[in-house]
Protein backbone atom coordinates (compact mmCIF):
# COMPACT_ATOMS: atom_id res chain seq x y z
CA UNK A 1 0.00 0.00 0.00
CA UNK A 2 1.40 3.37 -1.02
CA UNK A 3 1.85 6.32 1.36
CA UNK A 4 -0.72 8.27 -0.62
CA UNK A 5 -3.36 5.56 -0.05
CA UNK A 6 -2.79 5.61 3.71
CA UNK A 7 -3.58 9.33 4.13
CA UNK A 8 -7.23 10.14 5.20
CA UNK A 9 -9.13 12.71 3.17
CA UNK A 10 -9.17 16.15 4.88
CA UNK A 11 -12.98 16.22 5.18
CA UNK A 12 -12.98 12.99 7.23
CA UNK A 13 -10.30 14.36 9.51
CA UNK A 14 -12.57 17.40 10.21
CA UNK A 15 -15.77 15.37 10.74
CA UNK A 16 -14.39 13.03 13.38
CA UNK A 17 -13.60 15.71 16.00
CA UNK A 18 -16.94 17.42 15.28
CA UNK A 19 -18.86 14.22 15.99
CA UNK A 20 -16.91 13.68 19.19
CA UNK A 21 -17.64 17.24 20.31
CA UNK A 22 -21.35 16.82 19.54
CA UNK A 23 -21.50 13.59 21.51
CA UNK A 24 -19.69 15.19 24.43
CA UNK A 25 -22.08 18.20 24.35
CA UNK A 26 -25.10 15.89 24.29
CA UNK A 27 -23.66 13.95 27.21
CA UNK A 28 -23.08 17.15 29.16
CA UNK A 29 -26.65 18.27 28.44
CA UNK A 30 -28.07 14.95 29.65
CA UNK A 31 -25.90 15.14 32.73
CA UNK A 32 -27.05 18.69 33.49
CA UNK A 33 -30.72 17.72 32.95
CA UNK A 34 -30.33 14.74 35.27
CA UNK A 35 -28.61 16.95 37.81
CA UNK A 36 -31.40 19.53 37.65
CA UNK A 37 -34.04 16.82 38.02
CA UNK A 38 -32.22 15.34 41.00
CA UNK A 39 -31.90 18.80 42.57
CA UNK A 40 -35.63 19.43 42.05
CA UNK A 41 -36.53 16.09 43.64
CA UNK A 42 -34.22 16.76 46.56
CA UNK A 43 -35.74 20.20 47.04
CA UNK A 44 -39.28 18.75 46.92
CA UNK A 45 -38.39 16.31 49.73
CA UNK A 46 -36.08 18.60 51.66
CA UNK A 47 -36.41 19.48 55.33
CA UNK A 48 -37.77 23.01 54.65
CA UNK A 49 -40.37 21.57 52.25
CA UNK A 50 -41.39 18.99 54.85
CA UNK A 51 -41.94 21.75 57.42
CA UNK A 52 -44.16 23.57 54.92
CA UNK A 53 -46.30 20.46 54.40
CA UNK A 54 -46.65 20.07 58.18
CA UNK A 55 -47.93 23.65 58.43
CA UNK A 56 -50.54 22.94 55.76
CA UNK A 57 -51.58 19.75 57.56
CA UNK A 58 -51.99 21.68 60.80
CA UNK A 59 -54.08 24.25 58.96
CA UNK A 60 -56.41 21.63 57.46
CA UNK A 61 -56.79 19.88 60.80
CA UNK A 62 -57.63 23.14 62.58
CA UNK A 63 -60.17 24.09 59.92
CA UNK A 64 -61.80 20.66 59.89
CA UNK A 65 -64.57 22.17 62.02
CA UNK A 66 -65.82 24.10 59.02
CA UNK A 67 -67.17 27.51 59.96
CA UNK A 68 -68.97 29.37 57.20
CA UNK A 69 -68.72 33.12 57.49
CA UNK A 70 -72.27 34.54 57.37
CA UNK A 71 -71.22 37.09 54.74
CA UNK A 72 -70.15 34.49 52.19
CA UNK A 73 -73.73 33.98 50.97
CA UNK A 74 -74.41 37.55 49.91
CA UNK A 75 -70.90 37.73 48.42
CA UNK A 76 -71.77 34.71 46.27
CA UNK A 77 -75.13 36.23 45.29
CA UNK A 78 -73.48 39.49 44.21
CA UNK A 79 -70.96 37.53 42.13
CA UNK A 80 -73.72 35.45 40.55
CA UNK A 81 -75.69 38.56 39.59
CA UNK A 82 -72.64 40.21 38.04
CA UNK A 83 -71.79 37.07 36.05
CA UNK A 84 -75.38 36.75 34.86
CA UNK A 85 -76.07 40.38 33.96
CA UNK A 86 -72.54 41.62 33.17
CA UNK A 87 -73.41 44.72 35.19
CA UNK A 88 -72.05 46.04 38.45
CA UNK A 89 -74.63 47.18 41.03
CA UNK A 90 -74.85 50.84 42.00
CA UNK A 91 -77.86 50.60 44.35
CA UNK A 92 -79.06 48.01 46.85
CA UNK A 93 -81.07 45.23 45.15
CA UNK A 94 -81.65 42.89 48.10
CA UNK A 95 -83.40 44.67 50.99
CA UNK A 96 -86.71 46.47 51.45
CA UNK A 97 -85.30 48.72 54.18
CA UNK A 98 -82.49 50.28 52.10
CA UNK A 99 -83.84 49.59 48.61
CA UNK A 100 -82.29 51.78 45.91
CA UNK A 101 -79.83 53.33 48.37
CA UNK A 102 -76.47 53.91 46.61
CA UNK A 103 -74.20 50.92 47.09
CA UNK A 104 -71.30 49.43 45.14
CA UNK A 105 -69.85 45.92 45.08
CA UNK A 106 -66.43 46.96 46.36
CA UNK A 107 -65.18 43.33 46.44
CA UNK A 108 -66.67 42.32 43.10
CA UNK A 109 -63.70 40.37 41.74
CA UNK A 110 -63.45 38.14 44.80
CA UNK A 111 -67.23 37.72 44.72
CA UNK A 112 -67.10 36.53 41.11
CA UNK A 113 -64.47 33.95 42.06
CA UNK A 114 -66.64 32.70 44.94
CA UNK A 115 -69.71 32.54 42.70
CA UNK A 116 -67.85 30.65 39.96
CA UNK A 117 -66.47 28.09 42.41
CA UNK A 118 -69.87 27.65 44.08
CA UNK A 119 -71.41 26.99 40.67
CA UNK A 120 -68.82 24.30 39.92
CA UNK A 121 -69.08 22.30 43.13
CA UNK A 122 -71.22 23.94 45.78
CA UNK A 123 -70.11 24.03 49.40
CA UNK A 124 -67.45 21.32 48.89
CA UNK A 125 -65.75 23.35 46.14
CA UNK A 126 -65.91 26.47 48.30
CA UNK A 127 -64.25 24.59 51.15
CA UNK A 128 -61.54 23.38 48.79
CA UNK A 129 -60.99 26.96 47.58
CA UNK A 130 -60.66 28.15 51.17
CA UNK A 131 -58.09 25.43 51.90
CA UNK A 132 -56.07 26.22 48.76
CA UNK A 133 -55.95 29.99 49.28
CA UNK A 134 -55.23 29.75 52.99
CA UNK A 135 -52.56 27.10 52.43
CA UNK A 136 -50.90 29.43 49.92
CA UNK A 137 -51.04 32.27 52.46
CA UNK A 138 -49.63 30.03 55.20
CA UNK A 139 -46.76 28.87 52.98
CA UNK A 140 -46.17 32.49 52.00
CA UNK A 141 -45.87 33.48 55.67
CA UNK A 142 -43.47 30.58 56.23
CA UNK A 143 -41.39 31.69 53.25
CA UNK A 144 -41.39 35.31 54.44
CA UNK A 145 -40.29 34.36 57.97
CA UNK A 146 -37.60 32.02 56.63
CA UNK A 147 -36.35 34.63 54.17
CA UNK A 148 -36.03 37.29 56.88
CA UNK A 149 -34.52 35.00 59.54
CA UNK A 150 -32.37 32.97 57.15
CA UNK A 151 -33.50 29.89 59.04
CA UNK A 152 -36.37 27.56 58.09
CA UNK A 153 -36.71 26.20 61.63
CA UNK A 154 -37.10 29.68 63.04
CA UNK A 155 -39.60 30.43 60.27
CA UNK A 156 -41.67 27.35 61.11
CA UNK A 157 -42.01 27.68 64.89
CA UNK A 158 -43.76 31.10 65.09
CA UNK A 159 -46.44 30.00 62.64
CA UNK A 160 -46.94 26.73 64.45
CA UNK A 161 -47.33 28.58 67.75
CA UNK A 162 -49.50 31.38 66.38
CA UNK A 163 -51.70 29.04 64.38
CA UNK A 164 -54.99 30.06 66.07
CA UNK A 165 -54.27 33.74 65.34
CA UNK A 166 -53.59 32.94 61.69
CA UNK A 167 -56.68 30.77 61.29
CA UNK A 168 -59.00 33.53 62.51
CA UNK A 169 -58.25 35.56 59.38
CA UNK A 170 -58.85 32.60 57.07
CA UNK A 171 -62.56 32.86 56.39
CA UNK A 172 -64.55 32.18 53.26
CA UNK A 173 -64.71 35.81 52.14
CA UNK A 174 -62.79 38.00 49.67
CA UNK A 175 -60.58 39.09 52.56
CA UNK A 176 -58.71 35.77 52.28
CA UNK A 177 -57.41 36.96 48.90
CA UNK A 178 -56.39 40.27 50.48
CA UNK A 179 -54.41 38.37 53.13
CA UNK A 180 -52.54 36.45 50.44
CA UNK A 181 -51.80 39.63 48.48
CA UNK A 182 -50.37 41.31 51.61
CA UNK A 183 -48.01 38.39 52.18
CA UNK A 184 -46.90 38.51 48.54
CA UNK A 185 -46.18 42.23 48.86
CA UNK A 186 -44.06 41.73 51.98
CA UNK A 187 -42.06 38.99 50.26
CA UNK A 188 -41.38 41.25 47.26
CA UNK A 189 -40.21 44.08 49.52
CA UNK A 190 -38.01 41.77 51.58
CA UNK A 191 -36.30 40.59 48.40
CA UNK A 192 -35.86 44.20 47.37
CA UNK A 193 -34.14 44.91 50.70
CA UNK A 194 -31.78 42.06 49.81
CA UNK A 195 -30.94 43.62 46.45
CA UNK A 196 -33.32 41.72 44.14
CA UNK A 197 -35.44 44.25 42.26
CA UNK A 198 -37.48 42.26 39.72
CA UNK A 199 -40.35 41.37 42.15
CA UNK A 200 -40.96 45.10 42.52
CA UNK A 201 -42.23 45.36 38.95
CA UNK A 202 -45.00 42.84 39.61
CA UNK A 203 -46.59 45.11 42.22
CA UNK A 204 -48.75 47.27 39.89
CA UNK A 205 -50.34 44.07 38.56
CA UNK A 206 -50.85 42.86 42.13
CA UNK A 207 -52.54 46.11 43.13
CA UNK A 208 -54.91 46.27 40.16
CA UNK A 209 -56.21 42.83 41.20
CA UNK A 210 -56.12 43.72 44.90
CA UNK A 211 -58.16 46.95 44.67
CA UNK A 212 -60.94 45.07 42.87
CA UNK A 213 -60.89 42.21 45.37
CA UNK A 214 -60.67 43.64 48.88
CA UNK A 215 -60.25 46.96 50.67
CA UNK A 216 -57.07 45.80 52.43
CA UNK A 217 -55.12 47.13 49.43
CA UNK A 218 -54.83 50.38 51.41
CA UNK A 219 -52.64 48.52 53.92
CA UNK A 220 -50.40 47.52 51.04
CA UNK A 221 -50.02 51.14 49.94
CA UNK A 222 -49.17 52.13 53.53
CA UNK A 223 -46.52 49.39 53.69
CA UNK A 224 -44.85 50.64 50.50
CA UNK A 225 -44.86 54.22 51.79
CA UNK A 226 -43.31 53.04 55.07
CA UNK A 227 -40.53 51.19 53.24
CA UNK A 228 -39.81 54.23 51.07
CA UNK A 229 -39.77 56.76 53.90
CA UNK A 230 -37.69 54.59 56.24
CA UNK A 231 -34.93 54.43 53.66
CA UNK A 232 -34.61 58.15 52.97
CA UNK A 233 -31.59 58.48 55.25
CA UNK A 234 -29.28 56.30 57.32
CA UNK A 235 -29.14 56.46 61.09
CA UNK A 236 -28.97 54.29 64.18
CA UNK A 237 -30.89 54.94 67.37
CA UNK A 238 -30.28 52.34 70.04
CA UNK A 239 -31.38 49.00 68.60
CA UNK A 240 -33.12 50.58 65.61
CA UNK A 241 -31.30 51.27 62.38
CA UNK A 242 -32.30 52.75 59.04
CA UNK A 243 -30.35 52.08 55.86
CA UNK A 244 -30.69 54.68 53.12
CA UNK A 245 -31.69 53.50 49.68
CA UNK A 246 -29.22 54.07 46.89
CA UNK A 247 -30.33 56.57 44.27
CA UNK A 248 -31.23 53.68 41.94
CA UNK A 249 -33.14 51.77 44.62
CA UNK A 250 -35.07 54.85 45.65
CA UNK A 251 -36.06 55.54 42.05
CA UNK A 252 -37.18 51.92 41.59
CA UNK A 253 -39.28 51.95 44.75
CA UNK A 254 -40.84 55.31 43.87
CA UNK A 255 -41.74 54.07 40.39
CA UNK A 256 -43.28 50.90 41.84
CA UNK A 257 -45.31 52.96 44.31
CA UNK A 258 -46.46 55.36 41.61
CA UNK A 259 -47.40 52.39 39.44
CA UNK A 260 -49.44 50.90 42.30
CA UNK A 261 -51.24 54.22 42.83
CA UNK A 262 -51.81 54.72 39.11
CA UNK A 263 -53.71 51.44 38.70
CA UNK A 264 -56.11 52.00 41.62
CA UNK A 265 -58.76 53.73 39.43
CA UNK A 266 -58.83 50.72 37.06
CA UNK A 267 -62.12 49.41 38.40
CA UNK A 268 -65.74 49.29 37.18
CA UNK A 269 -66.41 52.17 39.59
CA UNK A 270 -63.41 54.35 38.80
CA UNK A 271 -61.83 55.84 41.92
CA UNK A 272 -64.73 54.93 44.22
CA UNK A 273 -63.18 51.60 45.24
CA UNK A 274 -59.93 53.37 46.09
CA UNK A 275 -61.61 55.72 48.57
CA UNK A 276 -63.89 53.11 50.18
CA UNK A 277 -61.43 52.22 53.03
CA UNK A 278 -61.48 55.87 54.13
CA UNK A 279 -65.28 55.82 54.20
CA UNK A 280 -65.06 52.74 56.42
CA UNK A 281 -62.60 54.40 58.79
CA UNK A 282 -64.29 57.78 59.19
CA UNK A 283 -67.96 57.56 58.20
CA UNK A 284 -69.23 54.32 59.78
CA UNK A 285 -68.94 54.66 63.57
CA UNK A 286 -72.03 52.57 64.33
CA UNK A 287 -70.82 49.73 62.12
CA UNK A 288 -67.37 49.75 63.71
CA UNK A 289 -68.78 49.98 67.25
CA UNK A 290 -71.32 47.15 66.99
CA UNK A 291 -70.03 44.55 64.55
CA UNK A 292 -68.12 41.90 66.53
CA UNK A 293 -65.02 41.73 64.33
CA UNK A 294 -64.46 45.49 64.67
CA UNK A 295 -64.49 45.42 68.47
CA UNK A 296 -61.29 45.67 70.56
CA UNK A 297 -59.16 42.58 71.16
CA UNK A 298 -60.94 40.38 73.74
CA UNK A 299 -58.17 39.43 76.14
CA UNK A 300 -60.52 37.18 78.13
CA UNK A 301 -60.78 34.56 75.36
CA UNK A 302 -58.20 32.06 74.11
CA UNK A 303 -56.98 33.85 71.01
CA UNK A 304 -56.78 37.18 72.87
CA UNK A 305 -54.60 35.58 75.54
CA UNK A 306 -52.40 34.00 72.87
CA UNK A 307 -52.01 37.36 71.13
CA UNK A 308 -51.03 39.03 74.40
CA UNK A 309 -48.65 36.20 75.26
CA UNK A 310 -46.83 36.46 71.92
CA UNK A 311 -46.43 40.23 72.26
CA UNK A 312 -45.17 39.97 75.86
CA UNK A 313 -42.73 37.20 74.89
CA UNK A 314 -41.32 39.32 72.07
CA UNK A 315 -40.88 42.30 74.41
CA UNK A 316 -39.12 40.14 77.03
CA UNK A 317 -36.77 38.65 74.43
CA UNK A 318 -35.97 42.13 73.15
CA UNK A 319 -35.14 43.37 76.65
CA UNK A 320 -32.90 40.39 77.35
CA UNK A 321 -31.03 40.10 74.06
CA UNK A 322 -31.19 43.58 72.51
CA UNK A 323 -31.92 42.57 68.92
CA UNK A 324 -31.30 45.17 66.23
CA UNK A 325 -34.20 45.94 63.89
CA UNK A 326 -34.72 47.78 60.65
CA UNK A 327 -36.87 50.84 61.18
CA UNK A 328 -39.61 49.82 58.73
CA UNK A 329 -40.14 46.32 60.14
CA UNK A 330 -40.28 47.64 63.70
CA UNK A 331 -42.83 50.31 62.74
CA UNK A 332 -44.99 47.75 60.92
CA UNK A 333 -44.86 45.29 63.82
CA UNK A 334 -45.78 47.99 66.33
CA UNK A 335 -48.52 49.36 64.07
CA UNK A 336 -49.97 45.88 63.53
CA UNK A 337 -49.99 45.27 67.28
CA UNK A 338 -51.78 48.54 68.03
CA UNK A 339 -54.35 47.98 65.27
CA UNK A 340 -55.09 44.45 66.52
CA UNK A 341 -55.61 45.79 70.05
CA UNK A 342 -58.09 48.39 68.75
CA UNK A 343 -59.90 46.06 66.32
CA UNK A 344 -59.60 42.27 66.66
CA UNK A 345 -60.09 41.99 62.91
CA UNK A 346 -56.67 43.59 62.43
CA UNK A 347 -55.03 40.27 63.28
CA UNK A 348 -55.19 40.20 59.50
CA UNK A 349 -52.15 42.53 59.44
CA UNK A 350 -50.59 41.75 62.83
CA UNK A 351 -49.45 38.23 61.94
CA UNK A 352 -47.73 39.09 58.62
CA UNK A 353 -45.99 42.08 60.24
CA UNK A 354 -44.99 40.21 63.41
CA UNK A 355 -44.01 36.75 62.20
CA UNK A 356 -40.75 37.82 60.51
CA UNK A 357 -39.57 39.63 63.64
CA UNK A 358 -40.38 36.69 65.91
CA UNK A 359 -38.66 34.27 63.51
CA UNK A 360 -35.53 36.45 63.53
CA UNK A 361 -35.51 36.35 67.32
CA UNK A 362 -35.82 32.56 67.42
CA UNK A 363 -33.05 32.05 64.85
CA UNK A 364 -30.61 32.81 67.67
CA UNK A 365 -31.29 29.36 69.17
CA UNK A 366 -31.73 27.23 66.04
CA UNK A 367 -28.96 26.14 63.72
CA UNK A 368 -29.25 26.79 60.01
CA UNK A 369 -30.39 24.16 57.56
CA UNK A 370 -27.53 22.13 56.03
CA UNK A 371 -28.47 20.47 52.80
CA UNK A 372 -25.70 17.88 53.00
CA UNK A 373 -27.16 16.55 56.27
CA UNK A 374 -30.73 16.25 55.00
CA UNK A 375 -32.64 12.97 55.39
CA UNK A 376 -34.71 12.88 52.23
CA UNK A 377 -36.30 9.47 52.84
CA UNK A 378 -37.42 10.44 56.35
CA UNK A 379 -38.74 13.76 55.02
CA UNK A 380 -40.69 11.94 52.31
CA UNK A 381 -42.22 9.57 54.87
CA UNK A 382 -43.31 12.45 57.10
CA UNK A 383 -44.71 14.34 54.12
CA UNK A 384 -46.67 11.27 52.99
CA UNK A 385 -48.13 10.92 56.48
CA UNK A 386 -49.06 14.62 56.52
CA UNK A 387 -50.70 14.42 53.09
CA UNK A 388 -52.65 11.35 54.21
CA UNK A 389 -53.83 13.31 57.25
CA UNK A 390 -54.85 16.23 55.01
CA UNK A 391 -56.99 13.94 52.85
CA UNK A 392 -58.36 12.09 55.88
CA UNK A 393 -59.39 15.21 57.78
CA UNK A 394 -60.77 17.09 54.80
CA UNK A 395 -64.48 17.41 55.58
CA UNK A 396 -66.94 15.42 53.50
CA UNK A 397 -69.79 17.04 51.59
CA UNK A 398 -72.36 15.67 54.05
CA UNK A 399 -70.40 17.07 57.00
CA UNK A 400 -70.17 20.46 55.31
CA UNK A 401 -73.91 20.49 54.65
CA UNK A 402 -74.63 19.59 58.29
CA UNK A 403 -72.34 22.39 59.39
CA UNK A 404 -74.24 24.87 57.23
CA UNK A 405 -77.56 23.58 58.57
CA UNK A 406 -76.40 24.13 62.17
CA UNK A 407 -75.33 27.70 61.45
CA UNK A 408 -78.04 28.96 59.12
CA UNK A 409 -81.84 28.77 58.80
CA UNK A 410 -81.81 26.06 56.13
CA UNK A 411 -84.96 24.24 57.36
CA UNK A 412 -86.69 27.48 58.28
CA UNK A 413 -86.31 28.76 54.72
CA UNK A 414 -87.76 25.48 53.40
CA UNK A 415 -90.70 26.00 55.74
CA UNK A 416 -91.27 29.56 54.50
CA UNK A 417 -91.22 28.31 50.93
CA UNK A 418 -93.82 25.68 51.78
CA UNK A 419 -95.99 28.13 53.73
CA UNK A 420 -95.28 31.56 52.21
CA UNK A 421 -96.35 34.56 54.25
CA UNK A 422 -96.73 37.85 52.50
CA UNK A 423 -95.26 40.97 54.02
CA UNK A 424 -91.96 42.35 55.32
CA UNK A 425 -89.74 40.01 57.30
CA UNK A 426 -87.36 40.84 60.12
CA UNK A 427 -84.13 38.86 60.22
CA UNK A 428 -80.90 39.25 62.15
CA UNK A 429 -77.56 40.44 60.79
CA UNK A 430 -76.04 36.95 60.61
CA UNK A 431 -78.82 35.25 58.63
CA UNK A 432 -79.50 38.03 56.14
CA UNK A 433 -76.80 36.90 53.75
CA UNK A 434 -78.23 33.37 53.63
CA UNK A 435 -81.70 34.74 52.86
CA UNK A 436 -80.26 36.92 50.07
CA UNK A 437 -78.78 33.82 48.44
CA UNK A 438 -81.43 31.17 49.12
CA UNK A 439 -84.67 33.10 49.59
CA UNK A 440 -84.26 35.81 46.96
CA UNK A 441 -88.01 36.27 46.43
CA UNK A 442 -88.17 37.80 49.92
CA UNK A 443 -86.31 41.08 50.43
CA UNK A 444 -84.37 41.15 53.69
CA UNK A 445 -84.40 43.60 56.58
CA UNK A 446 -80.61 43.57 56.95
CA UNK A 447 -77.56 41.54 55.94
CA UNK A 448 -73.78 41.76 56.32
CA UNK A 449 -73.37 44.96 54.27
CA UNK A 450 -73.08 47.16 57.34
CA UNK A 451 -71.86 50.18 55.37
CA UNK A 452 -75.09 50.30 53.35
CA UNK A 453 -77.36 49.98 56.36
CA UNK A 454 -75.52 52.58 58.39
CA UNK A 455 -75.82 55.17 55.62
CA UNK A 456 -79.53 54.46 55.25
CA UNK A 457 -80.18 54.59 59.02
CA UNK A 458 -81.36 50.97 59.13
CA UNK A 459 -78.45 49.75 61.25
CA UNK A 460 -79.41 52.10 64.08
CA UNK A 461 -83.01 50.85 63.99
CA UNK A 462 -81.79 47.26 63.89
CA UNK A 463 -79.67 47.79 67.01
CA UNK A 464 -82.73 49.20 68.80
CA UNK A 465 -84.59 45.95 68.10
CA UNK A 466 -81.94 43.31 68.81
CA UNK A 467 -80.82 44.98 72.05
CA UNK A 468 -84.47 45.20 73.18
CA UNK A 469 -84.52 48.93 73.67
CA UNK A 470 -87.84 50.53 74.70
CA UNK A 471 -88.53 51.42 71.07
CA UNK A 472 -87.91 47.88 69.77
CA UNK A 473 -91.53 46.93 69.06
CA UNK A 474 -92.21 50.40 67.67
CA UNK A 475 -89.44 49.84 65.10
CA UNK A 476 -91.07 46.58 64.02
CA UNK A 477 -94.38 48.43 63.65
CA UNK A 478 -92.73 51.27 61.71
CA UNK A 479 -91.39 48.87 59.09
CA UNK A 480 -94.65 46.89 58.97
CA UNK A 481 -92.95 43.64 59.97
CA UNK A 482 -95.28 40.64 59.77
CA UNK A 483 -92.74 37.82 60.18
CA UNK A 484 -89.62 37.49 62.35
CA UNK A 485 -87.03 34.84 61.47
CA UNK A 486 -84.69 34.66 64.46
CA UNK A 487 -82.04 32.47 66.01
CA UNK A 488 -83.01 30.20 68.85
CA UNK A 489 -82.49 31.86 72.21
CA UNK A 490 -81.65 35.37 71.06
CA UNK A 491 -83.16 38.16 73.22
CA UNK A 492 -85.76 39.23 70.68
CA UNK A 493 -87.05 35.64 70.37
CA UNK A 494 -87.50 35.50 74.15
CA UNK A 495 -89.32 38.87 74.13
CA UNK A 496 -91.69 37.90 71.31
CA UNK A 497 -92.51 34.59 73.02
CA UNK A 498 -93.93 36.60 75.91
CA UNK A 499 -95.83 39.04 73.71
CA UNK A 500 -99.52 38.40 72.90
CA UNK A 501 -99.03 40.30 69.63
CA UNK A 502 -96.82 37.55 68.19
CA UNK A 503 -97.30 33.83 67.66
CA UNK A 504 -94.55 31.27 67.24
CA UNK A 505 -95.28 29.03 64.26
CA UNK A 506 -91.97 27.25 63.71
CA UNK A 507 -88.98 26.16 65.73
CA UNK A 508 -85.97 23.90 65.16
CA UNK A 509 -82.54 23.58 66.70
CA UNK A 510 -81.30 26.68 64.88
CA UNK A 511 -84.18 29.01 64.08
CA UNK A 512 -87.57 30.17 65.26
CA UNK A 513 -90.29 31.96 63.28
CA UNK A 514 -92.90 34.35 64.71
CA UNK A 515 -95.85 35.94 62.91
CA UNK A 516 -98.12 38.69 64.06
CA UNK A 517 -101.25 37.39 65.79
CA UNK A 518 -103.30 39.75 63.63
CA UNK A 519 -101.87 38.15 60.48
CA UNK A 520 -102.94 34.72 61.68
CA UNK A 521 -106.47 35.77 62.64
CA UNK A 522 -107.04 37.77 59.45
CA UNK A 523 -106.07 34.74 57.41
CA UNK A 524 -108.92 32.72 58.95
CA UNK A 525 -111.52 34.92 57.39
CA UNK A 526 -110.21 34.23 53.93
CA UNK A 527 -110.08 30.48 54.47
CA UNK A 528 -106.60 30.58 52.96
CA UNK A 529 -104.91 27.19 53.21
CA UNK A 530 -101.59 28.65 54.27
CA UNK A 531 -103.18 30.89 56.89
CA UNK A 532 -105.28 28.04 58.22
CA UNK A 533 -102.15 25.96 58.61
CA UNK A 534 -100.51 28.88 60.43
CA UNK A 535 -103.43 28.99 62.85
CA UNK A 536 -102.95 25.29 63.61
CA UNK A 537 -99.24 25.83 64.22
CA UNK A 538 -99.81 28.88 66.38
CA UNK A 539 -101.91 26.66 68.66
CA UNK A 540 -98.98 24.33 69.20
CA UNK A 541 -98.80 22.17 66.06
CA UNK A 542 -95.31 23.49 65.19
CA UNK A 543 -93.21 21.88 62.53
CA UNK A 544 -89.91 20.50 63.88
Image (cartoon, rainbow, N blue to C red):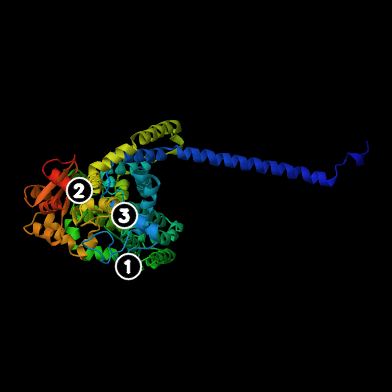
Residue 287 sits above or below residue 351 on the image: below
Give SS at disc 3: helix
Give SS at disc 2: helix
Provide residue 436's location: percent of width, then percent of height.
27, 54
In this view, the residue in front, 54 or 38, is 54
Residue 290 sits above or below residue 124 on the image: below
Which tag, 3 or 1, sits closer to the chain's start? Answer: 3
What residue is drawn where x is 27% and y is 67%?
A: 102
3D distance between C-alphas at marks 2 and 3: 33 Å
Closer to the eye: label 3 or 1: 3
The disc label shown at residue 272, or none: 1
3D distance between C-alphas at marks 3 and 1: 19 Å
Image side of residue 5 versus residue 68, left or right? right
In this view, the residue in front, 98 or 515, is 515
3D distance between C-alphas at marks 2 and 1: 46 Å
Contact flag, marks 2 and 1 (Cβ < 8 Å): no
Q: Which of the 4 quarters of the picture holds residue 127? A: top left
Which tag, 2 or 1, sits closer to the chain's start? Answer: 1
Q: Residues within 10 Å of mark 3 (few under 14, many from 20)?
A: many
Contact flag, marks 2 and 3 (Cβ < 8 Å): no
What residue is drawn where x is 72% and y is 41%?
A: 20
Give SS at disc 1: helix
Q: List the residue tagged with mark 3.
A: 75
Image side of residue 122 versus residue 472, left or right? right
Q: Which of the 4 quarters of the picture holds residue 383? A: top left
Quadrant showing the N terminus: top right
Closer to the eye: label 2 or 1: 2
Q: List the residue tagged with mark 2.
A: 530
Closer to the eye: label 2 or 3: 2
Q: Residues within 10 Å of mark 1 (few under 14, many from 20)?
A: some
Contact flag, marks 3 and 1 (Cβ < 8 Å): no
Amino acid sequence: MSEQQMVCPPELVAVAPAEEAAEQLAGDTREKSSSKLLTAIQWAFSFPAMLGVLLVARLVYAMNIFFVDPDVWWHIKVGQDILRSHRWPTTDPYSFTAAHTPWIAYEWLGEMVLASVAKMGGIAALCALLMVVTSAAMLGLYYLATLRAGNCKAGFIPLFLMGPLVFLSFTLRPQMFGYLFLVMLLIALEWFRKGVSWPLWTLPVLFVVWVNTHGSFIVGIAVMVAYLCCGLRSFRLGNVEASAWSAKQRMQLELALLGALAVLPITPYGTRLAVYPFDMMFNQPLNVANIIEWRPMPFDVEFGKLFLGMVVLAVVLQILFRFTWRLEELLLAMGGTVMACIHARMLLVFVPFFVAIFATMLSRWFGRYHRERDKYVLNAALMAAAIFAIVWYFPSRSKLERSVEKQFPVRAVKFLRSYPIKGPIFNNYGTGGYLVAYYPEQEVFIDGRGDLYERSGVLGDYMQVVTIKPAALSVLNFYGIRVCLLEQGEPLAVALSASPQWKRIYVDGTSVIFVRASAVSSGTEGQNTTSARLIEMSKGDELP
